[in-house]
Image: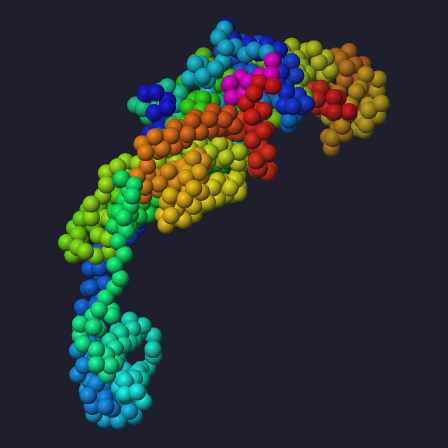
Amino acid sequence: MNKFWIIFFHTFLTKLKTKSFIVTTVITLLIIVLLANITNIIDFFNKGEEGEKIAVIDETGVLFDPFQNQLKAIDKDIQLKKFTGDKTKADKQVQNGDFDGVLVLSNNQENLPAAVYRSLTISNTSLLSSLENGLQQMKTQMAATQMNLSQEQLTKLYEPVSLKKVALEKDAKTEEELSQARGLVYVLLFVIYFAVIMYANMIAMEVATEKSSRVMEILISSVPPIKQMFAKILGVGLLGLLQLALMLGVAYFSLKQNMDSMEGGFFDVYGFGDVPVATLVYAFVFFLLGYFLYATLAAFLGSLVSRIEDVNQLITPMTYLLIIGFMIAMFGLVKPDATFITVTSYIPFFTPMLMFMRVGMLNLPFWEPILGIVILLVTIILFAIFGAKVYKGGVLLYGKSSSFKDIKKAMQLTKNE
Amino acid sequence: MALEIEHVSKRFGKYTAVDDLSLSIPEKTIFGFLGANGAGKTTTFRIILGLMDASSGNVSWNGKPVDYSTSDNIGYLPEERGLYPKQKVKEQLIFLARLKGMSKQEAEKELGRWLERFKVPDYADKKVEELSKGNQQKIQFIASVLHKPSLLILDEPFSGLDPINVELLKQAVLDLKESGTTIVFSSHRMEHVEQLCENLCILNKGKTVLQGSLKEIKQSFGKKNLIIHADFDVSFLKEYPGVRKSAVTPEGIQLQIEGEEVAGSILQEIVGRGFIRKFALEEPSLNDIFIEKVGASYE
């Protein structure tokens, strides 16, 4: 077998067998399954729990029924109970745990409802807002009656204004489409970001380990460094694809299974109901290109290090580039057509995330993503040529300090003179 | 047919690591590289292996320039241990042998044989980091010879080994030579070089100080060692004409003399003074030659 493939499969298989790889993969898969089933899980824990029980002391004698009606429409789980005793007695029952709280209804000077809510703690904000909403609606209705407004007049008053958004561009995405695209692009951006950081780091560590354990000397006495570097990058790349395929596969199936129970819910709004194939293909392409760009960078940075502890020091600037790209992409999700985003999407370090984000969110002319891909490819080739030169000298360079000055030294080692 | 090194120089900026080195190492012999630390041994090895390009000069093995087309025939044991600490012995040795063009089945068979020979068959499934330094060295040695190279380069092969393992490894090196391998090795331990090498060279600051066969070198050195053990005081011999160096030992004296004739006149001088238990004339040791040759240029 060709030596390139021997290194390729060796890298792939040994990484695949490491405990850390297996553990992180299994944990991530578990998290995905958990997240996909999150509504079921919440339901499961909520099943045994009854709604809050609240004692109502109605000082007016007429507010209890309309309030109960209003509240039922808002949250039918809250149980209201008319309480006949006085406040101190009610407080005591709250302390005993018979009730979750006491609501005292009264009228103010203008003969409109007012209320006091007494409970052990006032941390349950969802209950409080339900109560407030109920009271508000009851108050509005009573005020309307006082002013002799009819139900029609009232409806007219509260009818929401109609604002229709019309995009003049022919293929521009509708508001609904945009929010659907946003969800998917957001998730895929995250995947690209994490995967590129993780696998590029893995490459740098791998190279540094081989160098610090001096296996490198034996390896490069058998196989040219450049061949070895690319075999390694491809090997880890295959590992990454396998891991991502596993995650996406598990995510897809567990979401599909829960789709029925979530119809119309969060997942539908954010566009997981039907996934546009083009976006997935672009995500795949930009992940691969981004990986190759940063992996080449990481490989030659890793080759400059003498001790594994120094890897992070050299990798940090590269990681910053990725983080900056990700931050711009997050900003871009809100305003994808900003000029700033357009310009930065052609800077090779940011292209994988930004161009993908634009392609997913906007209707770009075909040449734009293609241009981005070409720019990336050219940069990768340049980096590979430059990186290979540094790598060849770098792997033989042993010194106390590891810094960017070593790039020059490594290049000198590679040259004949 | 041999390993030819012709006018090889290697400069790093202004620093010259190897300076116009020319050597011819005959096939199926063992060649010793001696030199103080920083003399340029490792750099020379790296150039022979093609890890580094020489600034000028050529290296050829059996008439062909050394590059990645010949690397399958070359075995290398680096000075510092070079193995994956977290991988199992068997796994990585087979990987390394396959990178030298050996098939997996053959590598497995050969590995079993070597582990058996070094009396460590149960290490096959252990991780390298679990082994002691000496045992790692044995594994490292196997890694360099597993693919049956015709040229074997050993950089400090005996460091970190106990005497029993040194013998084990020495015997392996001699057997490899018998079966036709050309072996180049470096060492700080002169006695190893004396026992193994037919030819050798001494490097100092990138230059060859001395080269040739062990016999020639010793003869041309001229000076000999004279050891005298006697019951009377022989320390006056320090000042005797023809004595270059001396060291008083508890049992007598050890002298370095300029030639055999000096020994004769010393014997006449001390005969009759008392009982002489030992009077021995010895070839100079490589150690003496090394110290003299390399030490002189230090001054």
Task: Pick the quarter of the image with the N terminus of chain A.
Answer: top left
Which colouring convention does the figure follow?
rainbow
Instruction: For residue B291, say whether it is visible.
Output: yes
Q: What segment is highlighted magenta in the picture?
A: B44-56
In the image, B258: left or right of B27?
A: right
In the image, A50: left or right of B98?
A: left
Which image quadrant for residue B38?
top right
Vertical placement of residue A168 versus B46, above or below: below
Vertical placement of residue A260 versus B142, above or below: below
Task: Pick the quarter of the image with the C terminus of chain A.
Answer: top right
Instruction: For residue A52, say whether it is visible.
Output: no
Vertical placement of residue A242 versus B60, above or below: below
Q: What residue is rendered at 26% in x and 93% in y? A: A86
Q: What residue is rendered at 80% in x and 26% in y? A: B234
Residue B295 in percent (x, y) is at: 73, 24
Residue A230 in percent (x, y) is at: 40, 27
Q: What residue is rendered at 41% in x and 44% in y? A: A338
Q: Compare residues A95 and B28 and report the one nearer the observer.
A: A95
Number of callouts in the render? 0
In the image, A344: left or right of B103?
A: right
Q: Compare residues B54 and B1 and report the one nearer the observer.
A: B54
Q: Compare residues B37 and A269 and report the one nearer the observer.
A: A269
Q: What residue is rendered at 60% in x and 37% in y? A: A400
Residue A377 in percent (x, y) is at: 40, 28
Residue B96 in percent (x, y) is at: 40, 26
Q: Compare residues A27 and B22 and report the one nearer the observer.
A: A27
Indicate yes or no whether the magenta region holds residue A291. Answer: no
